[in-house]
Image (cartoon, grey):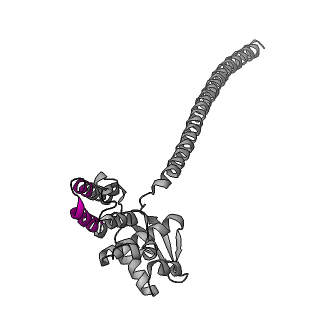
């Protein structure tokens, strides 16, 4: 939770700075944001109105770079490297980290061969070092390195920025989840009511049994008393008869 709070504070800082900058200063801010070791979400910065003003200017490539870091991968950069500025080592590392997050969105078991191809890594040692030092230590993913099966088993991965065209699908997914949650909540409430009803019925039944037991005890006690009285009377009568004889 502390990491999330710091990340939110960092985004807020860049958003506030972007809102009052323009031209080369704004391009410099984009470079700083996309190189920052603790920043992995960029859509809020991208939505600042001043960024849109870079479109069609000398600094429009900075806007393209910010879009790349918000939604793209290292493979996307390689495919469009001719129209994008060269990236610094920090930016390259960041974009490769984001690429791992993108792969983890759709598959929780990532083969080493796929990762090496996507990240331009030449050997397993280099790949595992990257996953450990640049991804797991950074807190953006957790998982298990399976050298025998040559794969990375993802247990947790931070979410990436949603593309605008993904929003409707996300809203629908959340709506479906909400409907399912409401249905489950109603089912639980019905089960609770049923359990309460059964509990009351059980209590009532137990009370009826206890009352019946008490009645039987009283009846037995009366019967026992009556039996003793009868036995005493019979014994007295017999004694009297014996004395008369």
Residue 149: x, y in percent? Answer: 55, 81
Q: Quadrant of residue 134?
A: bottom left
Residue at (27, 68) in percent of width and height:
31
Q: Is residue 1 visible?
A: no
- Residue 223 found in image quarter: top right
Queried whether the magenta region covers residue 27, the answer comes back as yes
Q: Quadrant of residue 133?
A: bottom left
* Residue interval drawn in magenta: 13-33
Q: Main secondary structure of the magenta part?
A: helix
Residue 28 in the figure: left or right of residue 194:
left
**2, 127: nearer the viewer:** 127
Task: Name the residue rendered at 54%, 83% in the picture.
Answer: 148
Is residue 150 shown in magenta?
no
> How far across and how far down the image is residue 111, in percent?
53, 77
Q: Is residue 241 above or below residue 187?
A: above
Residue closer to the observer: 134 or 15: 15
């Amino acid at each position: 939770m502390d990491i999330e709070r710091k990340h939110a504070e960092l985004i807020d800082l860049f958003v506030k700075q972007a809102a009052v900058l323009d031209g080369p200063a704004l391009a410099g801010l984009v470079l700083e944001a996309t190189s920052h070791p603790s920043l992995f979400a960029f859509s809020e910065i991208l939505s600042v109105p001043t960024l849109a003003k870079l479109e069609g200017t000398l600094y429009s490539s900075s806007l393209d770079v910010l879009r790349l870091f918000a939604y793209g991968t290292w493979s996307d950069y390689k495919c469009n490297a001719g129209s994008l500025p060269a990236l610094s080592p920090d930016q390259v590392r960041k974009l490769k980290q984001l690429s791992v997050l993108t792969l983890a969105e759709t598959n929780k078991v990532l083969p080493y061969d796929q990762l090496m191809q996507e990240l331009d890594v030449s050997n397993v040692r280099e790949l595992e070092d990257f996953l450990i030092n640049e991804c797991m230590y950074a807190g953006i993913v957790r998982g298990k390195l399976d050298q025998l099966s040559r794969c990375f088993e993802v247990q947790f991965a931070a979410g990436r920025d949603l593309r605008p065209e993904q929003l409707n699908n996300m809203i629908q997914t959340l709506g479906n989840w909400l409907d399912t949650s409401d249905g489950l909540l109603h089912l639980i409430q019905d089960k609770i009511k049923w359990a309460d009803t059964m509990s009351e019925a059980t209590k009532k039944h137990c009370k009826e049994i206890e009352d019946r037991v008490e009645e039987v005890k009283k009846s037995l006690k009366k019967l026992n008393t009556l039996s003793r009285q009868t036995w005493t009377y019979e014994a007295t009568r017999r004694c009297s008869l014996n004395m008369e004889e």
